[in-house]
Every structure is written in structure tokens, then in C-alpha cells.
Image: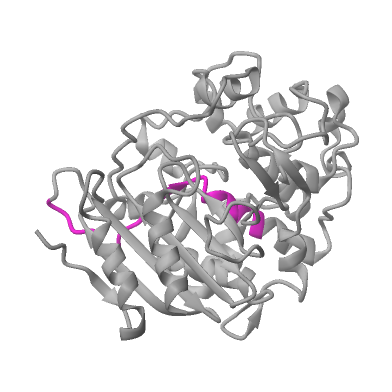
Amino acid sequence: MTIAVAGLCPARLEPVRRAFAANFEGDFPELGARFCAAIEGEIVLDLWAGHADRSCTQPFDQTTLTPIFSSSKAAAALMCAWRVGQGDLDYGQPAAQLWPDFAQKGKSGLTVEQVLSHQAGLCGLREAFDPQDWFDWDAMCARLTAAEPLWPPGTASGYHPSTFGHLAGELFRRADGRPLGQALREELCEPFGLELWIGLPQSEDHRVAETVRPPALPDLGKLTEAKTLAFFKPWSAAPAKDLRRWRGAELPASNGHATAAALARMAAILACDGQLDGREVLAPGLAQEAARGRITGQDLVLPFDLTWGAGFLRNQGLGIYGPSQHAFGHSGWGGSCVAADPERRLSFAYVMNRQSAHLIGDPRARRLIDSLYGCL
């Protein structure tokens, strides 16, 4: 059966529509998905299809919100960049200048940019605790301040799947005074009409797509203490059994809810040197400074050689966000992604509700991204 694809697709981008439709066929068909691209912040492609629920009774359409998991980190990193531009946060300053208790256990020299580039050695916590504590912001921040890093801070990157949100969010809060999710709504989403939340209000629950978990665990390679603590302990992440509590909490590493259009427009700020709709969001040059590589090499948690900016994953050496080595963004558990290409002033985002086991570079997203670049 041919899937009905809706949305915006000019004739020159027809190969992308065909690739999108093909994702609903084969051995791992989509349930519901959306792919969106913008040039100079203007949406030039917006495709959606499928169903928002497992029973296939609700359409996946332009109003559907999707959990984007770690693609949320791109929004958190952008907000940190915005705060740097306001002068209250500096990438090069010790994190403990803002957060004095963070200096414990050898962390006094860690800079803000090292924390944001996954160099803090806090990808997971050794001491067991009740997973419900993830919903207690102050308690989790206290655990992070008291924790001893799993490797010498600043010597290597090790992806922080869950703790990144509290680390980045607490640095932001101490610089700004507001929770990061609140500031995201007030400074970016509401002014530009972006359907993106970190901490979703209950009024939007009816729009959220049901997620189908991956068919297998991701392949992290040989398990180490860092990988086990980051992903496989009962306390490694906030429990999502109580969906309302999980959706409503502020977890900047993992519980963003968004449309692909909102993500593509958000990333346009990064692709267009801080501009969106003719308004300056970031000072000139700040987007590139946020994306500048801070560390390159074998990540201690993800089984890849990676280059991390200040919260952004750079495309160099990966090719998961198209051919440009200057593109950057973030991917989320199960397949979502959002990225910016400053060379082409292009941004794009992919969301879906059937998750795959790929850690980054989901083949469904790559097929769409490669088709898009082939048309440009």
C-alpha cells in the first residue's frame, strides 16, 4: 500500500518525498514521521505521514508532537549560547565560578565548555539512588556536585545521556535565574511560534505521539563502567512509566517534545549566524563559536570517534548530517535529529515515533538528508 504523504514539497525536492515514502516500506517501516527543512529560516520542505498511535487510529500530522529524547540537547546548547551572548555565562570560565559546590572531587578546573562537551566524567553516577530523584532538580544537582568523575576531567569525552541536562541546566539557571525550559519558552519558542517544550504542559498531552521502543538494544561495543553507569543501571535515567510526570518535568537532556518544523526553525538560528526572521537571537559569530570543536577522539561512552562543540555534535568525520564537515546538531534515542549547515544556511529536522536501535545516523534520517542535499 502506498503511503499518503502530506505537506509541502516543491517539484525540485520530489526525490525527498519519494525517499520519505520509501521509509514506510521494507523491513523496518515507519509508523509516523515528519521531515522538515529550512533555508534562511524559511520552511522549504515539510513532509509528514503515518499514524501517531500504535493502533493506527490517529493520523500523524502537522499538529503532532513527538518526544525527541537527546535531540533536546541541541535546544539546551542553544540556550546556553544565548546566555553567553547576554554576558552572564562564558564558555572558558570554570563552572565552579557559577556553581561553587561543583568544585568538589577534582572538578574545580572544569570549564563551562568542557562540561558542555561531555568532558566532565559524570556520564553516570556510581552511588545507587531512587530513579524518582531525577524529578528533584536540587537533589540531582547535589549528587553531581558530590560525585567523583569517572575519568580525569578534561582528558576525554564520554557522552552524558542524562546528566548533561542537569549540568547544562544548572549552569544556565545560575547565570540566568530561570529554569532552562522556562527561558526557552519565553525567549525563543513563544516569540517565534516554535512548538517545542522542555517540560510539556498537560494541555498538550493529547498531541503527543505514542512511541514504539527499538527492537533491540543499541550496540555500545565492549561494556565499561562508564557505559554501564550511563545507560544500564536502574538509576541511569528518569523513569517514564508515569508519562505525565516525565513529560512535565524539566529534563533538558532527554524529554523535549516538538514538531520537526519547530526544530528546523530553531536550528536556522545556528545556520544563519544567529538570525531568525530578520531578528538577532545570537550575536554574530556566536553560533559558530558554540559549534567550534572542543574535543575530538574516541568517545568513552559512544562507540565512535566524535568531535563535540559546546553541546553540539559536529558532523566532521561522521557524515550523518549530510556532506558538509561544518554541519552540526544532535541526534536522539531512536532516530530523531536536528542539524544546521552554516555553509548553505540550511537547517533540517527529522522526528518519528517508531524507534530504531541506531545510536546516531539512523538510516531513515540519512536517506532523507542525503536526498535533500542531492536536490540542492
Toward the viewer: 224 or 53?
224
When the figure is inspected, residue 111 is found, relative to residue 292, above or below; the finding is above
Q: Residue at x 76, y 59 (%)?
A: 292
Residue 358 seen: yes
Q: Residue at x 73, y 41 (%)?
A: 297
Toward the viewer: 127 or 181?
127
Residue 62 seen: no
Horizontal relation, residue 238 to residue 217: left or right: right
> Where residue 206 sits in the image (x, y, percent)?
27, 52
Which stretch appears magenta?
57-78
Report the label total: 0
**Can you tell which quarter of the image residue 96 is in?**
top right
Taking the magenta stretch, the answer to whether it contains residue 172 is no
Q: Residue at x 27, y 44 (%)?
A: 210
Horizontal relation, residue 67 to residue 359: left or right: left
When the figure is inspected, residue 111 is found, relative to residue 82, above or below; the finding is above
